[in-house]
Image: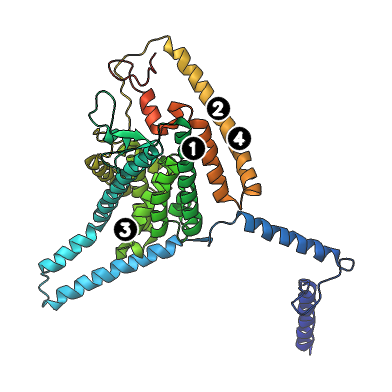
């Protein structure tokens, strides 16, 4: 009797606790029900307006199709299963030979190929990156010179190659017209055409090809999934749009985008190998090596590329990845040197040579330049953030128009100045030349 009354009291207490701890749920309006009256439920109205504002804000800043990450534990488990299955297959193959334990040359060749597959991949990636970099350098120079004139003997040659070996003047290189205003208008039209083509290709076919892409690649190597950001289509549009954007006269460089197309190349080539297609950790090693090769071909420095990948791109950089990255950068620079796009034997358009010793009084000027560089960098970063906010707010739907207008304004301002008219890298080469011998460019040393 006491036991039954105690059980009933426990059940009533549990019921009271469940009723007291039950959450208060507000019924959401469905498509068939009417929305709540603001006067009846102001809290629900405020919550709905806040949610709507959040959705609109996310829609404005959202650029990527998915927000998933890689499960590294599951990826490592799949790799262990793959290795276990390979060992099991090897043991069963040995038992199939009568227990003698002897493996044929075909099996040994396959195992050697599987063990050295990483070096094969980084070799192919490095060769492809060097080839792409050389082709982009040649195309960029030709597009930049075609705005000023053309070569009569061979239309596909730029001004440097057309006038190769000429000592006094270059009769083979002709301006578009002998009338200065006509050349001015054609220069502006070429700049507008190049920028329009590049912006249209990027917006229509590969939106991920916009920008340098270094920030996104750091997230991808860390495990963030962005489908299509390193795809073949992005690589193609990036390779076409980069020379057009540089030749249009826009204040953009190839150093940052070179890392993007290099990583795209590594991702595309690694997808042909089953080991890297199924393992994200191994793919990350190839992407790190590709980033090092991209910096190496941009600056002509394999060691600098490895340091950039080690310090900036990867948060996990084992020793084997270090050596593979260095080897990939070496292969890329070797292919670029073999292509010799500038016909000078140099990996980049210009190299700084220090053939004189510095003087003690120059330290003061070095300090002034350093202080100015720091202040100018802080100024640019501050105003760059404000410009980005302005562009997102007012120019978000006018990307092509923005690029064309900037290219036209740049061409209008730069053409009257002969040093701003030419390619930015070529102008830097002229500034670094010594004022001795025949290196004077239009009496610049005067």
Residue 81, position as x, y percentages in the image: 33, 69
Q: Earlier in the sequence, mark 3 or mark 1?
A: 1
Q: Nearer the viewer, residue 192 or 47?
A: 192
* Distance from the alpha carbon under mark 3 to that under mark 1: 43 Å
Are circles 3 and 1 on residues that touch, CB within 8 Å?
Answer: no
Q: Is residue 110 above or below residue 439?
A: below
| Badge number at residue 271 | none
Q: Which residue lies furthest to the right in this view?
A: 39
Q: In which quarter of the image is residue 424?
A: top left
Q: Which of marks 2 and 4 is nearer the N terminus?
A: 2
Q: Quadrant of residue 354?
A: top left
Neighbour tally class for label 4: few under 14, some 14-19, many 20 plus, Cα within 10 Å = few
Q: Which of marks 1 and 4 is nearer the N terminus?
A: 1
| Badge number at residue 376 | 2
Q: Is residue 9 above or below residue 149?
A: below
Please name the residue that numbered disc 1 is placed on. 185
* Image depth: mark 1 or mark 4 in front: 1
* Distance from the alpha carbon under mark 1 to that under mark 4: 35 Å
- Taking 388 as reference, is 144 left or right? left
Please name the residue that numbered disc 3 is placed on. 269
Q: Which of marks 2 and 3 is nearer the N terminus?
A: 3
* Image depth: mark 3 or mark 1 in front: 1
Q: Nearer the viewer, residue 150 or 196?
A: 150
């Amino acid at each position: 009797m006491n036991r039954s009354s105690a059980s009933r009291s426990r059940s009533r207490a549990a019921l009271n606790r469940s009723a007291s701890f039950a959450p208060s749920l507000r019924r959401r309006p469905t498509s068939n029900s009417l929305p709540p009256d603001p006067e009846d439920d102001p809290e629900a109205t405020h919550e709905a307006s806040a949610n709507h504002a959040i959705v609109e804000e996310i829609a404005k800043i959202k650029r990527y199709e998915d927000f998933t990450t890689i499960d590294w534990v599951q990826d490592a488990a799949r790799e262990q299963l793959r290795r276990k299955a390979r060992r099991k297959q090897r043991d069963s193959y040995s038992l199939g030979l009568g227990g003698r334990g002897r493996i044929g040359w075909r099996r040994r060749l396959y195992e050697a190929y599987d063990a050295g597959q990483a070096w094969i991949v980084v070799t192919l990636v490095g060769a492809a990156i060097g080839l792409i970099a050389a082709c982009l350098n040649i195309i960029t120079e030709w597009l930049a010179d075609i705005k000023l004139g053309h070569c009569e003997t061979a239309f596909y040659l730029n001004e440097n190659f057309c006038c190769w070996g000429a000592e006094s003047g270059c009769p083979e290189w002709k301006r578009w017209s002998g009338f200065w205003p006509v050349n001015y208008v054609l220069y502006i039209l070429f700049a507008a055409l190049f920028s329009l083509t590049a912006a249209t290709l990027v917006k229509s076919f590969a939106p991920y090809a916009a920008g340098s892409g270094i920030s996104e690649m750091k997230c991808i190597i860390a495990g963030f999934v962005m489908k299509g950001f390193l795809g073949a289509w992005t690589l193609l549009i990036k390779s076409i749009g980069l020379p057009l954007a540089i030749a249009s006269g826009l204040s953009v460089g190839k150093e940052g985008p070179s890392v993007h197309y290099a990583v795209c190349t590594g991702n595309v080539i690694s997808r042909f190998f089953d080991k890297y297609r199924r393992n994200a950790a191994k793919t990350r090693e190839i992407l790190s090596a590709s980033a090092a090769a991209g910096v190496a071909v941009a600056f002509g420095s394999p060691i600098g590329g490895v340091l950039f990948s080690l310090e900036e791109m990867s948060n996990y950089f084992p020793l084997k990845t270090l050596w593979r990255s260095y080897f990939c950068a070496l292969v890329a620079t070797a292919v670029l040197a073999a292509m010799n796009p500038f016909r000078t034997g140099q990996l980049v358009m210009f190299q700084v040579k220090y053939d004189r010793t510095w003087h003690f009084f120059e330290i003061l000027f070095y300090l002034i330049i350093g202080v100015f560089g720091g202040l100018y960098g802080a100024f640019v970063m501050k105003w760059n953030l404000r410009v980005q906010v302005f562009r997102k707010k007012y120019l978000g739907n006018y990307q092509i128009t923005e690029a064309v207008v900037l290219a036209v304004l740049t061409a209008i301002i730069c053409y009257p100045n002969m040093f701003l008219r030419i390619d930015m890298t070529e102008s830097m080469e002229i500034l670094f030349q010594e004022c001795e011998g025949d290196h004077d460019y239009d009496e610049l040393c005067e």
